[in-house]
Image: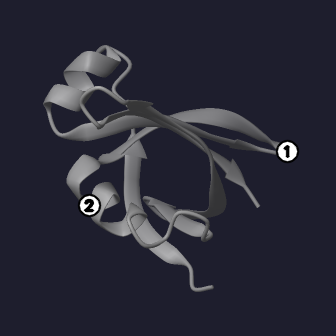
Amino acid sequence: MANVKIAISNRDEAKNPRQIRTEGFLPGSIYGKGMDAKNIQLNTHEFELLYKNNKDNVWELSLGKETYKAKIQELQVNYATGQYLNIEFATV
């Protein structure tokens, strides 16, 4: 299994998740042992393209100079529309 690389950014706390999704980003969080949880956002279109073939792979998340290796813990989907609502990553 190869690592899947994707760029993430810190989530703007002034905006609610609906506003973030409207701008084309997927809100989420990353957490793990020995670290504080971080609220993040990533490009929804880029995520959709990578997620199709890499559901169970390890994801390499780039946040500025920091890199996290994580697996998808939970992905919330609106099953009526197929829209991704929120994602949670757990570090490996």
Three-letter residue code for mark 2? Glu
Q: Quadrant of residue 10?
A: top left
Q: Residue at x 65, y 59 (%)?
A: 70
Task: Out of 6 and 63, give the one closest to the viewer.
Answer: 6
Q: Is residue 90 left or right of residue 25?
A: right
Which label sits on residue 9?
none
Residue named by callout 1: 34
Q: Residue at x 42, y 73 (%)?
A: 53
x and y percent of residue 69 in the render?
Answer: 65, 65
How would you rate the neighbour count of disc 2 (Cα within 10 Å): few for under 14, some for 14-19, many for 20 or more?
few
- Badge 2 marks a residue whose secondary structure is helix
Query: Of the residues under marks 2 and 1, which one precedes in the sequence?
Result: 1
Q: Residue at x 21, y 19 (%)?
A: 19
Residue 85, compared with residue 25, is above or below; it is above
Residue named by callout 2: 46
Which quadrant, please, contains the C terminus? Answer: bottom right
Three-letter residue code for mark 1? Gly
Q: Residue furthest left?
A: 23
Q: Residue at x 41, y 62 (%)?
A: 51
How would you rate the neighbour count of disc 1 (Cα within 10 Å): few for under 14, some for 14-19, many for 20 or more?
few
x and y percent of residue 52 in the render?
Answer: 38, 65
Residue 43, compared with residue 25, is above or below; it is below
x and y percent of residue 91 in the render?
Answer: 72, 54
